[in-house]
Image (cartoon, rainbow, N blue to C red):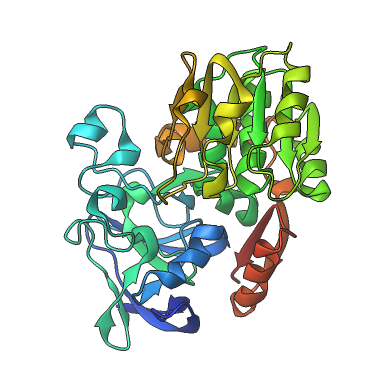
Amino acid sequence: MVTRSLAAITTGNEKFVIDEVSVDDPKSDEVLVAIKAAGLCHTDYDSMSWKQNLVMGHEGAGIVIKAGKKVKHVKEGDHVILNWAVPCGHCFQCVSGNEHLCENNSFVLAGNRGFGKGHAHRNGTLYKGKPIARSFNIGTLSEYTLVKSAAVVSISKTIPFPSASIVGCGVMTGFGSVINAARVQPSKSVVVLGCGGVGLNVIQGARIAGANPIIGIDTRETSLAMATKMGATHTLLAKTGDNELAHTVDEVKSLTNGRGADYAFECTARPTLGEAPLRLIRHGGMGIQVSGIEQKITFDMQLFEWDKIYLNPLYGKCRPQIDFSKIIDYYEHKKLFLDELVTKTYPLTKLNKAFEDMLSGKNAKGVIVFK
């Protein structure tokens, strides 16, 4: 049986259309999911420039409609979060605990964001009679999607779909960069440069880790106000275009015993700020590039003096079955905020408006909702 689904599809020329695709029934290790909410981030906007037809979206939550006969961890009717870094479970990286770097399914190793290695995931989706890739092999900006069973994690039915939908990228990336990658310790000082969707979740992770102080830096007062709600103990308003953060560095030092922070997280994705974490940390501190800068940038090697560490983790070193459950547990115990991060919801037909609001900084997180 084929399921008809309305989806956002990239045209290959930096635009998208809302059109119908057809989605197959699942094979033995696959799951058909009715998407109920899909979070938006800059990667979704960027996917319009990847020069291929693609079902958009890589954050989502929904309901299992059908599950293949080999699928044991979810069943029809379960509520699930989708995970875009789908582990195979048996390659070198998966066995080593790096499920987010799976050698068989990872888009990073394959050098192709849509298909992975190409043979690892069948399409199962047709557009105008031809196979079409799904963004990061899940394509959540669609009423229905067909995914590998390893791409879904079961959640409680009490969690609102919009709140659940943002866990699978923005929340996981920020939270995991603190907890899994940097392993921030209690009472250590943390600076977060950029208080958008990812940065706010770095702040949440730092608060849960017991960091103090937690310093949020942004060029927008509205973002700094949200940073305070998420757990920042101090906020600093930076000047647009001040890439060396001259005044801000002095302010950070004044809040950290004159040394600089123990940890600094860069969450702006701006290449001009790629070296900024090294300016904000003390000797022996750690800078973490969270936002995924992919351009070539030049470093002043003196910024690494002395004994500074610079990390560039992917997706908060996500282990979906472990980390998603941990995040949801914190949410259910009111230690991690999800509902508060969803600034506004939109129907799929208002995707352009949702992108406009995201790019202008109006939303912590915008979410597309489906009936």
Foreground residue among 120 and 280: 280
Rendered view: 204 above or below 55: above
Please indicate whether residue 8 sits to the left or right of residue 273 in the image: left
Is residue 170 found left or right of 54 in the rendered image? Answer: right
The residue closer to the viewer here, 125 or 14, is 14
Which quadrant would residue 202 be assigned to in this image? top right
**The image quarter in which residue 336 lies:** top right
* Rendered location of residue 192, percent (x, y): 65, 34
Q: For the N terminus, which image quadrant?
A: bottom left
- Establish if 200 lies above or below 13: above
Residue in the picture at 24% in, 43% down: 88
Residue 173: in sight, yes or no? yes
Q: How many marks?
A: 0
Residue ID at (70%, 66%): 357
State the image quarter where residue 297 is shown. top left
The quadrant the C terminus occupies is bottom right
Residue drawn at point x = 72 percent, y = 50 percent: 240
Q: Position of residue 236 (x, y in %)?
A: 79, 35
Q: Position of residue 296 (x, y in %)?
A: 40, 48
Q: Residue furthest bottom?
A: 128
Rendered view: 19 above or below 65: below
The reply to whether residue 31 is in sight is: no
